[in-house]
Image: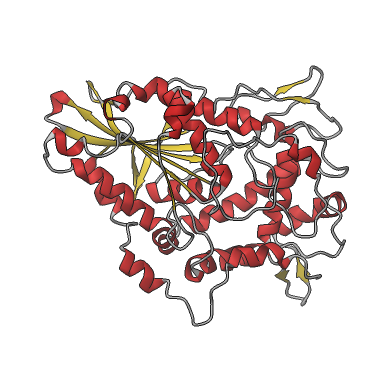
């Protein structure tokens, strides 16, 4: 992501945080006026050419997983939020893109792609065009050379469409690519909360690390995350006009921090008594706890196993020797637009867990590589925001590799892939349970402590 430009005279402390997160590290006592760079590209670096010893490798199939672009915050139950301000920032639906009625309902303008998010997505698409368009021969078999999947949120669909605009250089060409949007029970890009077995694993762990801790004398002390949140709770509650004794579960903590972060990224001033560094600390702590769950093998299989199965099925077409006409029938570029809840668990399932909360338009790229002078031998490489990632091997966690043979990757994936039958067996719903757990948690904070 391009750097946020700060006015002269603002004191900035980098705190060993990547350059795009400088905005979180403003020293106490300063109130910067941010000038947001609208020409944003989440991949600033040049593409690192893949090599195997001295052999140059070329991509023959690429899977691109993208978190949606910059958005308006999600609506918080009973909170006061500036509707008119965010209406001015939201990106209008382009006329070339047909409307849909099957998106997950979100009260407008909340949770919508912004104009800045559009620029981020186009920038990513242009990066993909520069490094993959010719190599993958996308127009040789267009439009079947591109497969586009999105979760059933309007912001993810629009993000993907704008990525395609940047990739293909034409809104008309982008509109010719059909989108695969699935119902929540069939969604594999994220845990939607529909399967209680999956979401309960996450909820129980997060509840345990955020609830107060009982002391030997019988009193209760806030958890580490709870103590961090207590520092800003009064300021956030006042800013959002919430009752002072409102109870904040961990999901609502994430949502409230998100409201302030979304505004701060657009130059809005934080409430008094709320420091950017405190918000960053809370989000980092919550992210670390989530990644602990995502790296749990049972959750990994239930949360990402079906998606990993789809990836493996596409890559496996190249495992055995097949004619070029057979493999040409498959897309050369797969684009998936999802959420932070896609990027974080997927990174763990691949053996390259992210260390920070993914920014808007953060992306994971899985490359299937080939060298003609290596007897059609295939390799796999994973990039995160354009940087190649060492993959920790599940068979030997102390060993990492930047480049795996296709067979090694398929072996690695066998630890996480799950069949539909096994998934449904493990996730069998108790009688009478049909509501979405995360939707319930969104309104739970209305209950006073």
Give the quadrant of residue 315: top left
Give the quadrant of residue 328: top left
x, y percent for residue 375: 11, 30
Query: Relative to 174, is 187 above or below?
Result: below
Give the quadrant of residue 210: bottom right
Query: Relative to 203, is 275 above or below?
Result: above
Q: Is residue 52 left or right of residue 118?
A: left
x, y percent for residue 413: 30, 51
x, y percent for residue 332: 30, 34
Residue projecting furthest to the bottom: 431
Is the N terminus in the top left, top right, bottom left or bottom right quadrant? top right
Query: Relative to 98, is 282 above or below?
Result: below
Task: Tell me if I can see residue 395 in this picture.
Answer: no
Q: Residue at x 75, y 39 (%)?
A: 86
Task: Tell me if I can see residue 257 in this picture.
Answer: yes
Q: Is residue 389 left or right of residue 244?
A: left
Q: Residue at x 54, y 63 (%)?
A: 193
Q: Is residue 378 left or right of residue 173?
A: left
In front: 29, or 435? 435
Q: Is residue 362 left or right of residue 265?
A: left
Query: Relative to 255, is 45 above or below?
Result: above
């Amino acid at each position: 992501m391009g750097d946020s430009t700060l006015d002269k005279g603002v004191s900035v402390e980098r705190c060993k945080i990547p350059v795009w997160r400088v905005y979180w590290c403003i020293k106490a006592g300063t109130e910067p006026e941010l000038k947001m760079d609208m020409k944003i590209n989440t991949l600033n670096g040049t593409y690192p050419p893949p090599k195997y010893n001295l052999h140059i490798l070329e991509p023959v199939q690429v899977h691109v997983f993208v978190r949606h672009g910059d958005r308006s915050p999600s609506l918080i139950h009973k909170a006061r939020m500036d509707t008119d301000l965010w209406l001015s920032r939201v990106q209008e639906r382009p006329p070339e893109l047909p409307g849909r009625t099957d998106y997950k309902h979100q009260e407008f303008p909340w949770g919508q792609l912004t104009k800045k998010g559009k620029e981020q997505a186009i920038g990513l698409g242009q990066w993909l065009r520069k490094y993959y368009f010719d190599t993958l021969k996308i127009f040789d078999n267009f439009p079947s050379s591109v497969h586009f999947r999105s979760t059933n949120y309007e912001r993810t669909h629009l993000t993907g469409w704008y990525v395609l605009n940047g990739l293909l250089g034409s809104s008309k060409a982008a509109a010719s690519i059909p989108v695969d949007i699935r119902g929540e029970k069939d969604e594999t890009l994220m845990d939607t909360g529909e399967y209680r077995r999956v979401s309960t694993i996450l909820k129980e762990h997060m509840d345990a690390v955020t609830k107060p801790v009982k002391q030997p004398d019988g009193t209760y002390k806030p958890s580490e995350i709870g103590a961090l949140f207590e520092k800003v709770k009064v300021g956030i509650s006042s800013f959002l006009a919430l009752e002072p004794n409102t109870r904040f579960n961990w999901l609502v903590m994430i949502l409230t921090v998100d409201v302030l972060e979304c505004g701060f990224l657009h130059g809005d001033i934080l409430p008094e008594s709320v420091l950017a560094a405190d918000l960053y600390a809370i989000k980092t702590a919550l992210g670390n706890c989530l990644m602990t769950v995502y790296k749990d093998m049972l959750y990994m299989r239930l949360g990402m196993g079906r998606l990993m199965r789809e990836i493996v099925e596409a890559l496996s077409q190249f495992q055995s020797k097949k004619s070029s006409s057979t493999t040409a029938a498959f897309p050369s570029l797969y684009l998936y637009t999802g959420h932070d809840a896609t990027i974080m668990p997927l990174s763990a399932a691949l053996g390259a867990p992210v260390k920070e909360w993914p920014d808007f338009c953060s992306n994971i790229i899985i490359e299937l590589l080939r060298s003609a002078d290596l007897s059609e031998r295939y390799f796999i490489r994973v990039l995160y925001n354009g940087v190649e990632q060492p993959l920790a091997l599940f068979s030997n966690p102390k060993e990492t590799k930047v480049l795996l043979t296709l067979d090694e990757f398929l072996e690695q994936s066998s630890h996480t892939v799950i069949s539909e039958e096994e998934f449904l067996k493990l996730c069998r719903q108790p009688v009478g349970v049909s509501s979405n757990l995360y939707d319930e948690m969104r309104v739970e904070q209305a209950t006073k402590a």
